[in-house]
Image: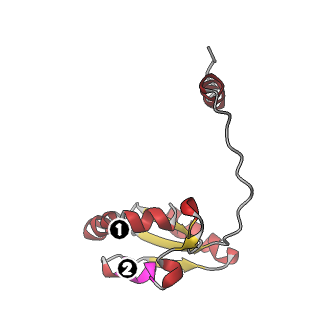
């Protein structure tokens, strides 16, 4: 999930902290900006610490990933499924150019069905 979605749905984090399902991992990709609305600094870009927020909700298994070398450890932690995990993965703001799909509903439907291995009609 993006940090935008994590911030907008912060109440869900409280529910996760109350239940602490051992097989749940939440990974937040955080570039510290609101990409959908013009790359304004997000709350995390202005100082909100998502790890502290998650810990405040009772989630003890938190980790901040700031280097690609840490991803393997995160993957092992997720695969272990031994505790609720909340990870904030800091990513660059650079994005490749967006390619919009055609606005042809029939073409979109057929492309989606083909990607699922279904016949088109």
- Residue 96 placement: quadrant: bottom right
- The mark nearer the N terminus, 1 or 2, is 1
Q: Which mark is residue 115?
A: none
Would you say residue 10 sits in the magenta stretch?
A: no
Q: CA distance from mark 1 to mark 2?
A: 9 Å
Q: Residue at x 49, y 68 (%)?
A: 3
From this viewpoint, is residue 60 visible?
yes
Locate the C terminus and report the quarter of the image it occupies.
Answer: top right
Quadrant of the rendered structure where residue 101 is?
top right
Q: Residue at x 32, y 65 (%)?
A: 16
Q: Could you tell me which secondary element the residue under label 2 belongs to?
A: helix
**Residue 81: x %, y % from top left:** 45, 63
For the record, the magenta segment spans 48-55
User: Is 40 above or below relative to 81?
Assistant: below
Q: Which of the two residues, 109 or 23, is positioned nearer the viewer here?
A: 109
Task: Name the secondary structure under disc 1.
Answer: helix
Outermost residue toward the top in this view: 121
Question: Which residue is situated farthest in the right direction here?
Answer: 97
The residue that appears at 39% across and 64% down in the rendered structure is 8
Q: Position of residue 67 (x, y in %)?
A: 67, 79
- Whether tag 1 and tag 2 are in contact, CB under 8 A, the answer is yes
Asked whether residue 82 is in view, the answer is no
Q: Is residue 6 left or right of residue 107?
A: left
Residue 52 highlighted magenta (yes or no): yes
Judging depth in this view, the residue of 115 and 40 nearest the camera is: 40
Callout 1 crowding tier (Cα within 10 Å): few <14, some 14–19, many ≥20? some
Circle 2 is placed at which residue position?
53
- Location of residue 49 in the rendering, given as x and y in whole percent from the top left corner: 45, 83
Residue 10's mark? 1
Q: How is the image coloured?
A: secondary structure
Give the residue at x 51% y 74%.
42
């Amino acid at each position: 999930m993006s940090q935008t979605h994590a911030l907008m749905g912060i109440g869900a984090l409280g529910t996760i902290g109350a239940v602490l399902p051992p097989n749940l991992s939440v990974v937040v990709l955080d570039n510290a900006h609101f990409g959908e609305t013009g790359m304004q600094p997000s709350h995390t870009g202005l100082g909100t610490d998502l790890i502290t927020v998650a810990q405040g909700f009772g989630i003890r298994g938190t980790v901040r990933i700031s280097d690609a070398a840490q991803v393997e450890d995160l993957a092992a932690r997720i695969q272990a499924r031994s505790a609720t995990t909340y990870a904030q993965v800091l990513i660059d703001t650079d994005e490749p150019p967006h390619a919009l799909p055609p606005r042809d509903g029939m073409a979109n439907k057929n492309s989606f069905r083909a990607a699922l291995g279904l016949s088109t009609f």
